[in-house]
Amino acid sequence: MVAAASFGRVAVLYGGRSAEREVSLKSGRAVLEALQGAGVNAFGIDAGEDLAQRLLSEKPDHVFIALHGRGGEDGSLQGLLESLQLPYTGSSVMASALGMDKLRTKLLWRGVGLPTPAWAVLEESSDCQAIIDQLGLPLIVKPIHEGSSIGMARVETLEQLREAWDNARRYDSQVLVEQWITGAEFTVAILDGRALPAIRLQTSHSFYDYDAKYLANDTRYLCPCGLDAEREAELAQLCLAAFEAVGCRGWGRVDVMQDAQGNFQLLEVNTVPGMTDHSLVPMAARAAGMDFTQLVLAILAGAHR
């Protein structure tokens, strides 16, 4: 591990103004506490409209990004930090912007031959019945630029599709509708070019929605994930390929479903996943023998300008 003093002053950015603000506040506070506990000269900034001025005033040596969603995970913050020549954790401007855009991520994966569920984009001119005829039922509706399952809904009828579309448009002007995959759900954390042990997610909800992630008491996280060694290695390689195809670096997480035939289908990539001590990346790190503080220091050590 790099000596704590070598990081200099570290700004932990959290909060922000996205729909994921509350999750980001928890991530940022956990990261800040871990860094300070390890002897790092770290301080927190709740990212608001004065963020550029705060960074110019504070003059940190490194920045740990714990902002989720728009304004923190979509490339705009990364562009600001690069213009200020501040080393920061996680993916670059381009990869962050791509990873935040579910549609363009899927287009990229499809273009390089990686598996992802069939989809359509919902627009004012869309024929919902034609989409159902094309993709079948059930379907899942997703805002293209949101995380934490915000605005997502499973639909089983034409009327539900229209209602879900109206709801998703409250969060994003662009909405994706995707073929429903029935099967096991997995998430694979990536750290410094290696895949950490896969986690299988089990929920009593119709899918791993916001409530299942942050509020429910019956969500199960299985690690070991239940796959045999060969299939887990296949899953790890797929997630590394998906991560690298988007251009991601440092750390992140890839979400995957296994369909009824046992094939893996890529859902999305997360370039700034949750970082509370109950989040999925820390859980995978523990399975790999790293405690939360070691994980945070490893992520910070990978900061780039």
Image (spheres, helix red, strand yellow):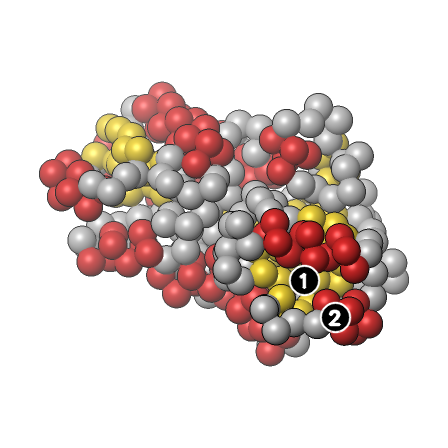
The C terminus sits in image quarter: bottom left
Report the number of numbered marks.
Answer: 2
Q: Residue at x 62, y 38 (%)?
A: 210
Q: Residue at x 77, y 56 (%)?
A: 159
Residue 209, image x, y percentages:
67, 41
Q: Are marks 1 and 2 in contact (CB under 8 Å)?
A: yes
Residue 169: image quadrant is: bottom right
| Residue 75 image position (x, y, % from top left) | 37, 58
Task: Name the residue that disc number 1 marks.
Answer: 177
Q: Residues within 10 Å of mark 1 (few under 14, many from 20)?
A: many
Is residue 190 something one can see in this rendering? no
Task: Determine if residue 171 is in view.
Answer: yes
> Which percent across, then down, holds residue 130?
76, 73
Q: Which mark is residue 131?
A: 2
Q: Secondary structure at mark 2?
A: helix
Q: Of callouts 1 and 2, which one flags the residue occurring earlier in the amino acid sequence?
A: 2
State the image quarter where residue 213 is shown.
top right
Tell me the kind of residue under disc 1.
Val
SS of the residue under disc 1: strand
> CA gap, disc 1 to disc 2?
9 Å
Q: Tell me which amino acid carries mark 2.
A: Ile
